[in-house]
Image: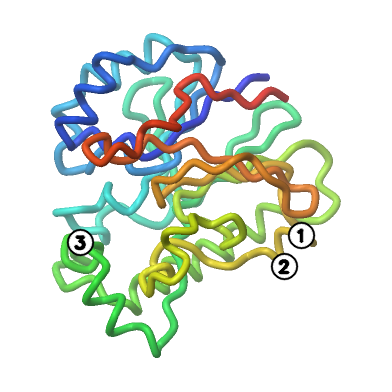
Amino acid sequence: MRIQYLSDLHLEFPENKEYLKQNPIKPLAEYLVIAGDLVPFRIMDRYNDFFDYLADHFEQVYWLPGNHEYYHSDIFQRSGQIHEQIRPNVHRINNRSVGKGEVKLVFSTMWTEIKPQNAFFLHQGLTDFHNIKNNGKTFRVEDFNQLHYEAIGFIKKEVPDGFIGKIIMVTHHVPTFLNYPEKYKSNILNEGFGVELFPWIETHGPDYWIYGHHHTNTEDFHIGDTLMLTNQLGYVAKGEHKCFQPTKVLEL
């Protein structure tokens, strides 16, 4: 079984759209996993040609929403458990699992937990709170945290001890600050990007964990028996795409 994986394509930005037009994703696996920030839901109809391309070139495609998917729309309308077909073989999925033989893929945007003492700074500085609505109202830190708590409950339930087979976790937000980008180490906004799950991953973790969000590609590394994987395009206009590997494949 081969799974191609990537994230943070950000098709809404002209430079990213042009880059992918000039460098289309070449199918090297049966399955493609997109770990968030593909395109905002509000404008996804403008990218039907991209979804058609994915449908024509992969057996199955799983698109996990990131935070940017909800920009300029209402998260209340499409959050929690999602499993929707965009094409017969292209799935938009969150807080749901998919079984493929002895392999289980577990999908969750995950979000993160913002501590009360940092709530003001995160609400002011994190663009999520200025671009997302929740049931017609301002998206609050409390809403952000609640999404995280629900996701963590789902994740822990889906990764039971003694599971026979392979488990692949797919999140958009970062599950550890180990090997976190050095340039962001002291940034107060980090709580909006990652959460420290190292102890749980080391003790109970899945076989693989695919994540995105901070637009920095690090080398694969282990936490306990879990192999941590990321492959992010990021903002082409800022040169964040230089370490992106469109042909990155997980072989099982």
Q: Can you tell which quarter of the image residue 98 is in? A: top right
Residue 15, x across and y down, in percent: 18, 30
Residue 127 placement: quadrant: bottom left
Depth order, front residue of 91/24: 24
103 and 7: which is toward the camera: 7
x, y percent for residue 106: 59, 44
Q: Amino acid at mark 2?
A: Pro
What is the count of numbered marks? 3
Badge 2 local density, few (<14 within 10 Å), some, or many (20+)? Answer: few
Find residue 213 and report its horizontal and vertical position in percent.
41, 50
- Compared with 132, 207 (above or below) is above
Instruction: State the quadrant of the N terminus.
Output: top right
Marks 1/2 in contact by CB < 8 Å: the verdict is yes
Using the image, tell me which numbered label, if any, was put on residue 132: 3
Q: Residue furthest bottom?
A: 117
Q: What residue do we see at 26% from left, 14% from top?
A: 22
Give the residue number, with chain letter if any, for mark 1: 202
Q: Is residue 238 left or right of residue 54?
A: left
| Image: 243 above or below 179 | above
Asked whether the beta carbons under mark 2 and mark 3 sit within 8 Å of each other, the answer is no
Chain-order first, disc 2 or disc 3: 3
* Helix, strand or loop at mark 1: helix
Determine which residue is flagged by label 2: 199
212 on left or right of 12: right
Marks 3 and 1, the one that precedes in the sequence = 3
Say if mark 3 contacts mark 1, CB within 8 Å. Answer: no
Disc 2 versus disc 3: nearer the observer: 2
Q: For this view, does 175 lie left or right of residue 84?
A: right
Judging from the image, what secondary structure is the residue with disc 2 in?
Answer: helix
